[in-house]
Image: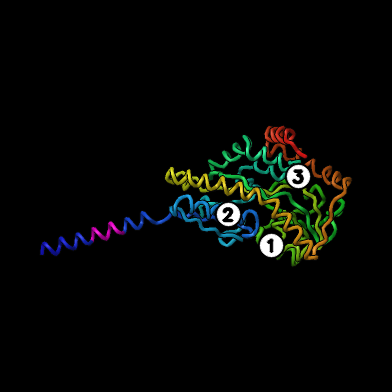
Amino acid sequence: MKFVSLLCATVAAGCLMAATAATAQEPIVIKFSHVVAPETPKGKGAEKFKQLAEQRTGGKVKVEVYPNSQLYKDKEELEALQLGAVQMLAPSLAKFGPLGAKEFEIFDLPYIFPCKAALVKVTTGTIGKQLFQKLENKGITGLAYWDNGFKIMSANKPLHATADFKGLKMRIQSSKVLQMRALGALPQVMAFSEVYQALQTGVVDGTENPPSNMYTQKMHEVQSHATLSDHGYLGYAVIVNKKFWDGLPADVRTQLDGAMKEATDYANTIAQEENDKALEAMKAAGKTKFYELTKDERASWRQAMLPVHEDMASRVGKELLASIKTETDAAKCE
């Protein structure tokens, strides 16, 4: 009887050890959610990070990428990250304003970056690091800035002069920077996943996007005109749940940092190429007529929208605005 009891205890202990070992070998899962198509620079960057993270950690980490708002829409994803429902996101920089980090709305200001070199000086320098620190007390750790280039305007009418915007319902992200009002348009905040249908049904008249977003969401099929304005910038911040990130083994976190750096270099390198390809594809489709502003028209657009900088200075911070101007003035723009 004692032998049987001992045998049972030994078997049970063995099963427990086997279960513990199996549990220890289970990979750390990172759910990486985003709202755009896999074919965009952000989508490809997320897939590159997945590949590198799993490779560098030797399978200790498994990255599950959920594109196209499969898990959460724009307004839901940040809350999901803070609650730990997902571990990683790459939201547009405009999303942090409503969260309380209004300084990030500096990226929404029209014509704030005269060229890509000026942008890089800001995101890779002291300013970029200081902005990420604003997220720490919200349970968020910032890992990298991903680029998606400059935006163009689209609508179902030509947009050449600023007067052409008067009365148009233009979809925007959730941001307090309202250059659309400066143009006489009516800004409409709307989730990215809802824009195509809203354009198709006339709920909104137009929107602004980098070409890659416009193309992969098929917005060119429901917008007859677009203007190559380069008036605003669209970038993303790759962020993680701070508690999750801080709780990772140090060696794993170091490996993921390396994977993120390489994925960031990749995503930012292909951004311009992907936008150029998207623009050519939309032109070839023939459903949207693209217009290049003349020198005088571009000057008129700038003149109409630059007062937004002064209007927003007290919100985003006058010192921050001055610091960015110093950095961008020092950039080597061709």
User: Of marks 3 and 1, which one's residue comes earlier in the chain?
Assistant: 3
Q: Is residue 325 above or below residue 48?
A: above
Q: Is residue 214 above or below residue 119?
A: below
* Helix, strand or loop at mark 3: loop
Give 45 or 33, whichever is nearer the viewer. Answer: 45
Q: Residue furthest bottom?
A: 201
- Which residue lies at the image location 82% right of the left edge and 43% below the top edge? 302
List x then y, in percent, for residue 167.
82, 56
Q: What residue range appears in magenta? A: 12-18
Alpha carbons under labels 3 and 1: distance apart: 24 Å
Alpha carbons under labels 2 and 1: distance apart: 18 Å
Picture quadrant where residue 214 is located: bottom right
- Apparent side of residue 12 relative to residue 126 in the rendered image (left or right): left
Q: Callout 1 environment at 10 Å: few (<14), some (14 to 19), or many (20+)?
A: some
- Apparent side of residue 132 relative to residue 199 in the rendered image (left or right): left
Q: Is residue 327 above or below residue 241?
A: above
Disc 3: which residue: 110
List x then y, in percent, for residue 118.
71, 39
Q: Is residue 323 visible?
A: yes
Disc 2: which residue: 46
Disc 1: which residue: 217
- Apparent side of residue 42 relative to residue 27 in the rendered image (left or right): right
Q: Is residue 15 magenta?
A: yes
